[in-house]
Image: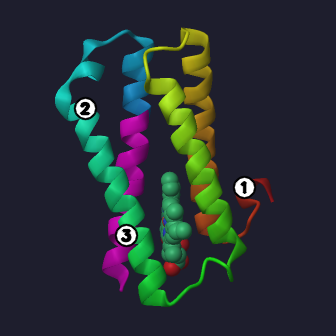
Amino acid sequence: MEWIKTLHVSCVVLSFCGFFLRGVWMLSGSTLLQRRWVKIVPHVVDATLLTSALVMLYLFQWSVLEHQWLQVKIVALLVYIGLGMLALKPARSMRVRSGAWLAGLAVFLFIVSVALTKSVYGFMG
Ligand code: HEM
């Protein structure tokens, strides 16, 4: 069952790199952000990331209710999605967007630390 974890972690790396790059393009005013594939690929990566998580829960027979660190991951993932939307939608000011981007990167790294430590506090514990 290592393959599914490998898939999950590969999507984690791709998702982080993609979010980082799009933030850099946002800050530098690059038109690359408007490219069709730049809008589509992150959704494919994130859908695969989430699907692989659900498949793991099924294969391992893990219940989200039983493991608090999984609950923290889900909530933090929702926060990350919200911050990502704030950061990458053009309607907001540059200050809000860059702040949301930095906060999103920090939340992402927090999720990784929760996954590695299986503790609800992650690197803050
Ligand atoms: C941005 C979102 C996410 C990130 C950055 C992330 C990150 C990671 C990382 C780095 C690992 C590997 C841990 C290790 O090698 O021990 C992992 C494993 C795992 N993740 Fe995620 N994950 C995310 C979302 C989720 C979600 C939403 C769930 C399900 C609620 C989930 C469930 C799992 C499970 C079950 C494992 C396997 C743990 C193990 O067998 O050791 N992940 N995740």
Horizontal and vertical percent for residue 91? 47, 14
Asked if disc 1 and disc 3 are in contact, CB closer than 8 Å, the reply is: no
- Amino acid bearing label 2: Val
Q: Distance between the Cα atoms at labels 1 and 3?
A: 23 Å
Task: Say whether residue 117 is visible.
Answer: no
Q: Is mark 3 within 8 Å of ligand 1?
A: yes
- Amino acid bearing label 1: Phe
Q: Distance between the Cα atoms at labels 2 and 3?
A: 22 Å
Q: Magenta part of the protein: which range?
A: 1-19
Q: In which quadrant will I find the C terminus?
A: bottom right
**Sequence order check: which comes first, mark 1 or mark 3?**
3
Q: Which residue is mark 1?
A: 123
**Sequence order check: which comes first, mark 2 or mark 3?**
2
Q: Residue at the spot x=44%, y=70% of the render?
A: 53
Q: Count the numbered circles shown.
A: 3
Q: Residue at the spot x=25%, y=32% of the render?
A: 38
Mark seen at residue 38: 2
Please identify the dominant SS of the magenta region.
helix
**In which image quadrant can residue 51 be found?**
bottom left
